[in-house]
């Protein structure tokens, strides 16, 4: 009996194992084209392009497609924009051919955004471009035909949860019109499920389904939509359905993860200006250089780049977007081989740019993307152990070999004959086998400043190497200190630690260096009458970076126990300045952590310690300084433009764990 049970269990295990392996293989097969593509076009287009950021003569803060929510526009008033939406200049052929000229391999276009308006003919709701506008035509049919013509894959964005028009649809921040109230399950059954069926059935092959903001989605609700994917067997989906469904790829928005997302497929979606949907007054355009280098950076970390355009209500892509797409396309015509079908860089850090790679027939082509062209024309690449077959400029059709020298684990390429390319110059290095790289070792420490003594560690991902270091700013050699464990030492002055990897008594990596500064603790201040809690000033406005709050009039001000965002009066387009005192328990070196979505800054004793400014998702940055026991002035400046928000402030005294700044340490000077 026991034997038969064991055999049955083993059989089931083997079947499940094979099933998992088969599923993994199928998933990677479905994603094969997507990994090859690396670059796609995002299109946010809808009736929000009619008001274009302006409602009743007022510029509504926030991104263009969120105007209904940010302006709290009643359903009946917002729906009236449909009658004004007549994109007579829309030409799918022009849009798709422009994407092809830009070097993009796929398109994801909004079929329905959060405003609930369908950009296709839908039988589930008359609130769509065919039935509710004078245009009376289905642009997605035209897009499908044009994509087929130009060999571009087509994908649809669909807002499955948020729907500010149909009763029961969710809304971040809550409903503002009674007509929005209803049962979400009924909304899903009557609107979302039928419409997803329509977009998957009526437009030929669909390669991507891009969900968004799963507000209110549960596993049970997600289960209503998942079976529909069988209508397009080869389709891939993102990670925003909700209900615990991972999807096929991650979607960092408006930022590039510093190290990519190891072990995950990912796609960074980003705008050319600050908004996704068209907004008349958003003229904050990124340069073509920034966009090209973003593409390279993302590819070097193994990701895809989904770059957005927001057409206007006439169906026209803004001219600055067209100009930049053509500039990107020009660069890709020469350098596309260094992007399409490439894998992530085998190097951790390259100071002058980025690297992508391709393996083929026992060889690897390393594409060295040079952002900062060396002034002396000598490009140094550290740590590569493979035999180098040939090095040449990708833009050189003759692939004329470049002079190369090798010394102490470094290869130096002579670029004196290479003409610099606009945005990035690509050098191809062909090597035998797969890359074998000894990255420079990492020097880590609790802090890079100290009062009397310091400690540090040196590590490498290659266990076979010896780690040698110096403390006098000299290059590590075979006779330098051999690292055997955490180094602790007293020092009466600042110093630089340099470290390098050695194998068989030979240098095999570049050099890492870390500077340690001996500091005197900043003196404490003496408040007249300290009282628990912070003071704050709350502002409203639309910014891409932190404004000069001192020139603005606050909407309100008051006191709060800590860095509490619940004092906000709206979910987007606001800013807060927190000011007060922090009670430091002892002379020590303190590391502060500032995490925010969107931008923030941390000031200690009137000096900027951490700059985490700009538009981004939750990102954490750190700063450190030596503080004397007592009270110190602290200020945190924060702003939120659109999407989710968040603010966390933490610290750790040297030698102690990281903790959120506790309210009992936070004060303000009542007599100030």
Image (cartoon, rainbow, N blue to C red):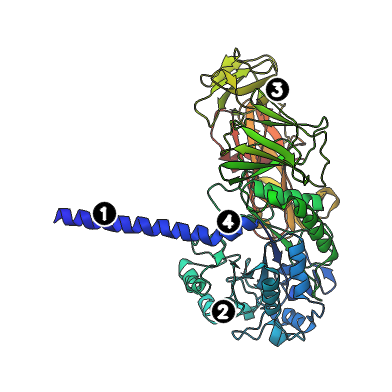
Alpha carbon separation for disc pair 3 and 2: 67 Å
Alpha carbon separation for disc pair 3 and 4: 42 Å
Taking the image as drawn, is residue 532 in sight? no
Q: Residue at x 53, y 62 (%)?
A: 30
In this view, the residue in front, 202 or 64, is: 202
Label 3 or label 2, whichever comes before in sequence order? 2
- Count neighbours of disc 4 (C-alpha within 10 A) and say few if under 14, some if 14 to 19, many if 20 or more: some
Helix, strand or loop at label 4? It is: loop
Label 4 or label 1, whichever comes before in sequence order? 1
Helix, strand or loop at label 3? It is: loop
Label 1 or label 3, whichever comes before in sequence order? 1
> Disc 3 vs disc 2: which is toward the camera?
2
Alpha carbon separation for disc pair 4 and 1: 34 Å
Q: Residue at x 65, y 76 (%)?
A: 116
Residue 466 placement, left or right of 3: right
**Residue 256 location, x and y as percent?**
67, 49
Residue on which the image places disc 1: 10
Please give the label number shown on residue 409: none
> Disc 1 vs disc 3: which is toward the camera?
1
Residue on which the image places disc 4: 250
Residue on which the image places disc 3: 519
Alpha carbon separation for disc pair 2 and 1: 41 Å
- Count neighbours of disc 1 (C-alpha within 10 A) and say few if under 14, some if 14 to 19, many if 20 or more: few
For the view shown, which residue lies furthest in the left direction?
1
Helix, strand or loop at label 1? It is: helix
Quadrant of the drawing holding the N terminus: bottom left
In this view, the residue in front, 283 or 355, is: 355
Alpha carbon separation for disc pair 1 and 3: 63 Å
**Residue 105 location, x and y as percent?**
68, 62
Q: Residue at x 65, y 21 (%)?
A: 497
**Residue 40 location, x and y as percent?**
68, 61
**Residue 146 location, x and y as percent?**
71, 74
């Amino acid at each position: 009996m026991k034997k038969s049970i064991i055999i049955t269990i083993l059989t089931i295990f083997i079947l499940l194992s094979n099933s998992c392996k088969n599923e993994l293989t199928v998933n990677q097969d479905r994603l094969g084209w997507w990994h090859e593509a690396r670059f796609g076009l995002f299109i946010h287009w809808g009736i929000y392009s009619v008001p274009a950021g302006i409602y009743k003569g007022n510029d509504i803060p926030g991104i263009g497609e969120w105007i209904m929510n940010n302006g709290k526009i009643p359903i009946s008033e917002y729906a009236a924009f449909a009658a004004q939406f007549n994109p007579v200049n829309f030409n799918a052929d022009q849009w798709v051919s422009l994407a092809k000229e830009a070097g993009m391999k796929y398109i994801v276009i909004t079929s329905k955004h959060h405003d609930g308006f369908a950009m296709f003919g839908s039988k589930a709701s008359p609130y769509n471009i065919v039935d509710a506008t004078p245009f009376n035509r289905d642009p997605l049919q035209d897009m499908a035909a044009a994509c087929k013509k130009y060999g571009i894959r087509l994908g649809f964005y669909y807002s499955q949860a948020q729907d500010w028009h149909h009763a029961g649809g969710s809304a971040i921040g809550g409903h503002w019109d009674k007509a929005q109230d209803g049962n979400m399950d009924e909304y899903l059954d009557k609107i979302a499920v039928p419409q997803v069926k329509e977009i998957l059935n009526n437009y030929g092959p669909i390669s991507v389904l891009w969900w968004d903001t799963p507000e209110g989605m549960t596993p049970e609700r997600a289960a209503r939509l998942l079976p529909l994917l069988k209508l397009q067997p080869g389709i891939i989906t993102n990670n925003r359905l909700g209900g615990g469904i991972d999807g096929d790829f991650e979607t960092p928005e408006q930022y590039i993860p510093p190290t990519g997302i190891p072990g995950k497929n990912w796609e960074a979606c980003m705008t050319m200006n600050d908004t996704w949907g068209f907004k008349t007054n958003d003229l904050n355009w990124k340069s073509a250089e920034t966009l090209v280098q973003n593409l390279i950076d993302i590819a070097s970390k193994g990701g895809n780049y989904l770059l957005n355009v927001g057409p206007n209500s006439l169906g026209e892509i803004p001219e600055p977007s067209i100009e930049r797409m053509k500039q990107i396309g020009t660069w890709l015509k020469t350098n596309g081989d260094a992007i399409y079908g490439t894998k992530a860089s085998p190097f951790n850090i390259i100071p002058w740019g980025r690297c992508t790679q391709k393996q083929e027939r026992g060889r690897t082509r390393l594409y060295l993307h040079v952002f900062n062209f060396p002034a002396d024309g000598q490009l140094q690449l550290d740590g590569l152990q493979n035999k180098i077959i040939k090095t040449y400029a990708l833009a050189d059709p003759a692939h004329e070999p470049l002079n190369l020298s090798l010394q102490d684990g470094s290869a130096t390429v002579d670029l004196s004959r290479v003409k610099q390319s606009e945005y990035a110059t690509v050098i191809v290095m062909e090597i035998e086998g797969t890359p074998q790289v000894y990255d420079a070792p990492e020097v880590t420490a609790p802090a890079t400043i100290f009062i009397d003594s310091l400690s540090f560690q040196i590590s490498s991902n290659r266990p076979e190497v010896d780690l040698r270091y110096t403390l006098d700013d000299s290059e590590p050699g075979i006779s330098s200190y051999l690292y055997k464990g955490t180094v602790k030492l007293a020092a009466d002055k600042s110093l630089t630690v340099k470290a390098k990897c050695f194998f068989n008594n030979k240098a095999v990596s570049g050099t890492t260096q870390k500077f340690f500064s001996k500091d005197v603790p900043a003196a404490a201040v003496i408040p007249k009458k300290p009282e628990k809690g912070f003071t704050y000033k709350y502002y409203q406005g639309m910014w891409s970076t932190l404004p000069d709050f001192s020139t603005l009039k606050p909407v309100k001000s008051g006191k709060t126990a800590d860095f509490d965002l619940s004092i906000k009066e709206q979910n987007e387009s606001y800013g807060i300045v927190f000011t007060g005192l922090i009670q430091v328990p002892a002379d020590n070196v303190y590391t502060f952590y500032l995490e925010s979505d969107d931008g923030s800054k941390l000031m200690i004793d009137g000096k900027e310690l951490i700059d985490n400014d700009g538009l981004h998702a939750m990102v954490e940055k750190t700063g450190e300084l030596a503080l004397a026991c007592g009270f110190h002035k602290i200020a945190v400046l924060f702003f939120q433009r659109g999407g989710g928000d968040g603010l966390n402030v933490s610290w750790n005294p040297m030698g102690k764990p990281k903790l959120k700044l506790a309210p009992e340490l936070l004060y303000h000077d009542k007599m100030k």
